[in-house]
Image: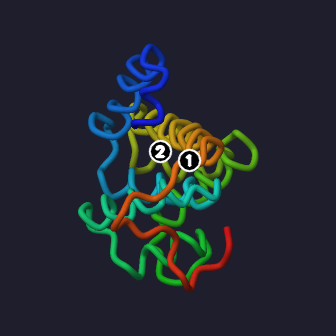
Amino acid sequence: MATLANYSKLYKRWRVFGNHVLFKSSLPGRDREIIILRIGWLCHAEYEWGQHAIIGKQCGISEEELKRIIEGPDAEGWDSFDATLLRAVDELYIDSFISGSIWQKLSEKYNTKQLIDLIFTVGQYNLVSMVLNTLGVQLEEGIDGFPKESLTP
C-alpha cells in the first residue's frame, strides 16, 4: 500500500472498490480466497499469494488445498463446486469469459450478486497482480511466497 500511496488520488478511489471485493463481497470468504489465490498463482503474483495464503487459512483453506489451488481444477480432492470455481477463474484469465457450462454450474449455488462478485474478484486481483509484479513489490518480512515445492507458475 505504501507503493500505491505515491499516487494518493488513485489509491483513495481504488481502495473503495478493493474494500468491497475483499470485505463486503457477497461471496463466502473461503470461496473468495480460492478465487484470489488462483488468479494470483496464474499471474505469478508471489506477494499476492503470500498475503492471501494467510487470509485463506483464516477462512478455512487447508495446506493441502493451497497445493491443489496451484495444481488447478483437475487436481484430485476437489469437490465439484470448488473445481468449478477454479475453472471459472482459469476461463476468465485465459478467455476473459466464463463459458455457459461453467456459468450454469456456478448458478446452481450462486445468486446474481455472487456471480457478479466472482467476476469482479478475478478482475480486481488480476489488476492487483499486474501492479504488484510491475512495480516490483517485495514480500513483507515474515510472509512466505509460493511454496518451495510448487511448480513455477
Q: Residue at x 41, y 82 (%)?
A: 64
Nearer to me, 85 or 103? 85
Residue at x-position 53% and y-position 40%: 128
- Residue at image location 42% in from the left, 32% down from the top: 112
Q: Which residue is mark 1?
A: 104
Task: Inspect the image, locate mark 2, and give the three-letter code of the amino acid beneath it.
Answer: Ser
Secondary element under disc 2, as helix, strand or loop, is helix
Q: Are marks 2 and 1 in contact (CB under 8 Å)?
A: yes
Q: Quadrant of the C terminus?
A: bottom right
**Residue most toward the right?**
95
Q: CA distance from mark 2 to mark 1?
A: 5 Å
Secondary structure of residue under mark 1: helix
**Residue 118 location in percent, x, y?**
47, 41
Q: Position of residue 136 (x, y in %)?
A: 60, 48
Going by the numbered disc 1, the residue's amino acid type is: Gln
Which part of the image, by quadrant, shows the N terminus?
top left
Using a 10 Å C-alpha cutoff, classify the residue at mark 1 as few (fewer than 14 neighbours), some (14 to 19) or many (20 or more).
few
Kindly indicate the quadrant of the structure image that contains residue 100: top right
Residue 62 lies left or right of residue 92; in this view the side is: left
Q: Residue furthest top?
A: 9
Task: Report the side of 54 relative to 135 (left or right).
Answer: left
The residue identified by callout 2 is 107
Name the foreground residue: 107 vs 78.
78
**Which residue is at a point 42% across and 19% down the rendered structure image?**
8
Residue 70, label in figure: none
Q: What x and y, as percent, mark residue 23?
A: 27, 38
Q: Position of residue 61 (x, y in %)?
A: 33, 69
Q: Quadrant of residue 152?
A: bottom right
